Image (tube, rainbow, N blue to C red):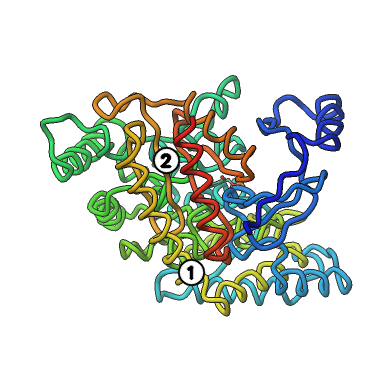
Amino acid sequence: MGSVRIATPLPGPRSAALLVERRRWVSAGVSEARHGIFFARGLGALLEDVDGNVFLDFAGGIGCMNAGHSAPRVIERARAQLERLQHSCFMVAPYEPYVELAAKLCAITPGRHPKKAALFTSGAEAVENAVKIARRATGRPAVLAFDPGFHGRTLLALTLTSKTTPYRDGFGPFAPEVYRFPIPDVLRRPHALSAEECVQRGIADLHRFLKSNVNPAAIACAIIEPVMGEGGFIVPPAAFLHELQRLCREHGILLVADEVQSGLARTGAMFACEHTGLEPDLVTLAKSLSNGLPLGAVVGRADIMDAVQPGGLGGTFGGNPVACAAALGAIETIETEGLVARARAIGETAGRRFEAFQARFEFVGDARGVGAMRALEFVRDRRSLEPDKARTERIVDLAIRRGLLVLTAGLHGNVIRTLMPLGIRDAELGEGLDILESCLADA
Ligand SMILES: Cc1ncc(COP(=O)(O)O)c(C=O)c1O
């Protein structure tokens, strides 16, 4: 017997009642989940709604639950910390879990250089602070970012972010001195070009951009996601990343890897940078860092992290002790339960199935990803590769009715991505992939 259990119409009666209240009291600017279902409980890779229906979770709270719902080590550490000290503000009355977590993050992030860390409350805040640190350390104003990247919704992070609707519309003017460059689009390259030629053309265009748009001597940092999350799980070509790193070193530009979504075991390495040997100066983390509690981090070269004047970094809630304790429990779970290897195994299983979907269904334009960070891109046909958002939404709607929660991504909203908890059992993974295939067949 499978783990999915749907016993009411969806949304069920309690969810339907909550939806009415939600529409009455919550701002319309906070997007409403299309399914209208409210959830009450999570365990491992399963979510139970307020009407007792059980779903498989391939969304993981947008990539926050790598260690799994209700991970025992996270709960134990967070509960013990909650009972001892909830908050005192690290800058005013410091506590041990902040220091313990900073040391741990310095040990596990890429690069053997001496490192230091600073803790915040979200991914966007980590990104904003990475830019502040880079500007202070270099004395330069400009920031280079890449389309179709996503770095958050606060003003500077939003300026770095690519998608107009819904993220950017109406929120300008944006922060100055941000330059965005498109990564080579290998999937939709001109027919005359090979993949390698397309990447080389992208590299040449980047050189030109640094002549025409912004002098590299004015750039404090370049920020890039080693696997682009909201952009549609697009993997920037390794040659492009290597050239970016080389340019950064040549011109004294700091390289920031935004591992908010790709970090903490998701891609089958502790950090996605490891797949290409990228050694960033700064790394930004959040999401699965604390298994969903509000926490963000910047970790990087000690001399750069120390370039900021005391008091220049921080925030009332940054590095809250309960969130730090949860993060220590999440990292312990990843390490002791072998979730890096597990992400690789999930990636192999899901990757094989996704390739089979691509062979079976003409409307699957691409199956891609790294480790358990896998995606299917839906198109009208393989020749035009015209994005098919409507079919993508039909698949997502069918999937939830059959008990599978999945997330879309991509500039055109035509990508389905997998961010399931990494402790998902083989049987659950198979069940979820079977449901997805049945939805592809019927949508
Ligand atoms: C790569 C990346 N950076 C930054 C952010 C922003 O994180 P938060 O939503 O915690 O502010 C996200 C969120 O999806 C992300 O995927």
Image x and y of residue 430, in percent = 50, 57
User: Residue pushed farthest left?
Assistant: 192
Q: Is 119 on the left-hand or right-hand side of 81?
A: left
Rendered image: mark on residue 142:
2
The 10 Å Cα crowd at callout 2, few under 14, some 14 to 19, many 20 or more, is many
Q: Which residue is mark 1?
A: 342
Q: Is 19 on the left-hand or right-hand side of 396?
A: right
Above or below, comparing residue 154 to residue 325 in the picture: above
Disc nearest the viewer among 1 and 2: 1
Q: Type of residue at label 2? A: Ala
Specify whether residue 192 is in view. Answer: yes
User: Residue pushed farthest bottom?
Assistant: 336
Image x and y of residue 110, in percent = 42, 69
Specify whether residue 177 is in view. Answer: no
185 or 51: nearer the viewer: 51
Task: Point out the tag, 1 or 2, that comes first from the N-terminus.
Answer: 2
106 or 48: nearer the viewer: 48
187 or 424: nearer the viewer: 424
Q: Residue at x 26, y 52 (%)?
A: 247
Disc 2 secondary structure class? strand
Q: Residue at x 76, y 74 (%)?
A: 77
Q: Residue at x 28, y 36 (%)?
A: 185
Mark 1 touching mark 2, by CB under 8 A?
Answer: no
Q: CA distance from mark 1 to mark 2?
A: 39 Å
Q: Quick one: quadrant of the N terminus?
A: bottom right
Q: Is 406 on the left-hand or right-hand side of 188?
A: right
Q: Is 129 on the left-hand or right-hand side of 203?
A: right
The 10 Å Cα crowd at callout 1, few under 14, some 14 to 19, many 20 or more, is many
Disc 1 secondary structure class? helix
